[in-house]
Image: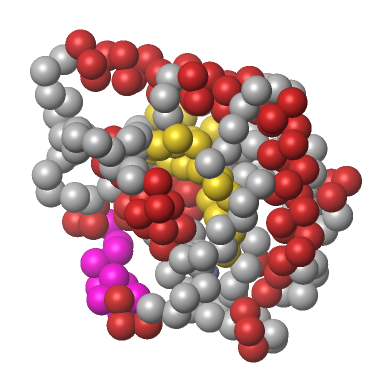
């Protein structure tokens, strides 16, 4: 399966600098609210580790990538509802020298193959291999793709014609939720992976709550589909805050 790291690597320093100033907090949300843009598709941006596959620290070998048993079916449901599914994952283990980009891509191919067998499809896997403190010069970058920055979402939105404000970010860490806030998407937190721990011990410190908090990806998909059905019944969805 395609692993467009395109968009992840182009250093767009000037835009990044401009973005830095505006990427914090709700002010980054698009002002036009949640209106549908004709001809554009809605997407679900899925975190990988702890959301699609078990959180094991770092997946430094293909054998360590274990899909949650409900993952393929959940993705297939999104596919059938006409949603574009995109994986967006920080893989700083590359920058830390723990494993190679080739390994990351291999894991994504494996996941794509498992999904294919189950009739599920991910449009693209985006990953950020960078870290600002990497000892490997190639990966030492204060990039725009590392979540909670929104570079991967923007690259996918451009490539697939996605209306981000009509889309969802699903992940097991608050950083994923911040990515969603920064991009102006809706947010669903799952309690698999780091989710339960973060939710239990850190939620009081969160400046903004996720739109939904659910047990796992299966429940996330249920809530997304329900949400969309409800949205269709109403003339216009209100911007959430
Ligand atoms: Mg995660
Ligand atoms: Zn990056």
- Compared to residue 202, the image places residue 93 above or below, namely below
Q: Is residue 157 left or right of residue 2?
A: left
Q: Residue at x 37, y 82 (%)?
A: 13
20 drawn magenta: yes
Q: Quadrant of residue 20?
A: bottom left
Residue at the image position 71 percent from the left and 56 percent from the top = 105
Q: Which residues are magenta?
A: 16-25
Majority secondary structure of magenta residues:
helix
Q: Is residue 80 above or below residue 64?
A: above
Look at the image and tell me in which quarter the C terminus lies: top left
| Residue 126 in view in this figure | yes
Based on the picture, tell me whether residue 117 belongs to the magenta stretch.
no
- The way the protein has been coloured in the rendering is secondary structure
Q: Position of residue 86 (x, y in %)?
A: 51, 43
The percent coordinates of residue 170 (x first, y second) are: 48, 38
Where residue 239 sits in the image (x, y, percent)?
17, 35
| Residue at the spot 61% in from the left edge and 55% down from the top edge | 3
Front-most of residues 41 and 237: 41
Outermost residue, top direction?
233
Q: Residue at x 79, y 67 (%)?
A: 99
Residue 219 appears in the figure: no
Task: Give the vertical position of 240 relative to 208 (above or below).
Answer: above
Label count reads 0
**Image coordinates for residue 168, horizontal then vertical, percent:** 39, 37
Q: Nearer the viewer, residue 139 or 131?
A: 139
Q: Is residue 19 left or right of residue 127?
A: left
On screen, residue 39 versus residue 176, left or right, reads: left
Q: Nearer the viewer, residue 140 or 126?
A: 126
Q: Which quadrant of the view contains residue 139? A: bottom right
Please tell me whether residue 160 is drawn above or below residue 38 in the rendered image. Answer: below
């Amino acid at each position: 399966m395609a692993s467009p790291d395109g968009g992840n690597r182009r250093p767009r320093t000037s835009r990044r600098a401009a973005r830095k100033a505006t990427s914090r907090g709700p002010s980054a949300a698009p002002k036009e609210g949640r209106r549908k843009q004709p001809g554009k598709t809605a997407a679900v941006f899925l975190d990988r580790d702890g959301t699609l596959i078990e959180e094991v620290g770092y997946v430094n070998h293909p054998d360590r990538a274990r899909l949650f048993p409900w993952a393929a079916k959940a993705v297939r449901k999104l596919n059938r509802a006409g949603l574009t599914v995109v994986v967006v994952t920080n893989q700083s283990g590359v920058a830390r020298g723990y494993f190679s980009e080739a390994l990351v891509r291999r894991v994504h191919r494996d996941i794509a193959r498992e999904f294919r067998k189950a009739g599920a499809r991910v449009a693209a896997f985006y990953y950020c291999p960078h870290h600002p403190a990497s000892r490997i010069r190639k990966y030492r970058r204060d990039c725009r793709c590392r979540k909670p920055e929104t570079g991967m979402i923007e690259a996918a939105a451009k490539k697939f014609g996605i209306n981000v404000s009509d889309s969802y970010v699903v992940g097991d860490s608050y950083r994923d939720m911040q990515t969603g806030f920064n991009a102006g998407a809706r947010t669903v937190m799952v309690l698999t992976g780091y989710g339960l721990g973060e939710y239990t011990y850190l939620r009081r410190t969160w400046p903004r709550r996720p739109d939904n908090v659910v047990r796992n990806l299966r429940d996330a998909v249920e809530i997304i589909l329900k949400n969309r059905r409800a949205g269709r019944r109403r003339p216009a969805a209100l911007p959430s805050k």
